[in-house]
Amino acid sequence: MKRKLQRKRGARRALLKNLATSLILYEKIQTTKAKAKEIRPLVERLVRRGKKGDLATRRYLLKFLPQNAALKIIEDLAPTFSKKSSCLRILRLGKRKGDGAEMALIEFVERPSEGKREKVEEKGKKEKDEKR
């Protein structure tokens, strides 16, 4: 951890855990640039760890994340990013109107839900063609 994000240790850990969980579940989130830069290595480390997929890995992930987020890493995210070193990107969005904070969008490079959606659409088209 490099940045303190103007919080004490417990509040900062809770913030990072909640941001990481939201990023894993929704696959992209909009936050400040400092927070995005802080959670990027944390989430990449968790995804890299999830590639193994054994019991020890599950327990390690469950120590940091809720069950649904930990399972999503093991089942969806880790196989998608098995050969890539970096799985996240940060896009700058400009300044927030209220306080002028730099905003950023942090997202997975290849979103697994998009791939599933395309496969489902292709399957639906094939089934329609077969019925005709």
Image (cartoon, rainbow, N blue to C red):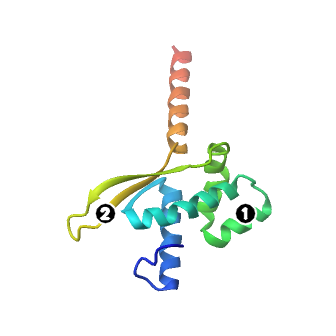
The x and y percentages for residue 41 are 56, 61
Find residue 58 and name its label. 1
The x and y percentages for residue 18 are 49, 70
Q: Could you say which quadrant of the image residue 42 lies in? A: bottom right
Compared with 76, 56 (above or below) is: below
The x and y percentages for residue 17 are 53, 71
Amino acid type at mark 1: Arg
Left or right: where 31 falls relative to 114: left
Q: Residue at x 75, y 54 (%)?
A: 52
Which quadrant is the N terminus positioned in? bottom right
Report the label total: 2
Amino acid type at mark 2: Glu
Which residue is denoted by mark 2 in the rendering? 102
Q: Residue furthest top?
A: 132
Compared with 5, 46 (above or below) is: above
Residue nearer the viewer, 132 or 104: 104
**In this rendering, which labeled residue sits more in front, label 1 or label 2?**
2
Compared with 17, 107 (above or below) is: above
Q: Residue at x 55, y 44 (%)?
A: 112
Q: Residue furthest front?
A: 2
Q: Residue at x 56, y 49 (%)?
A: 87
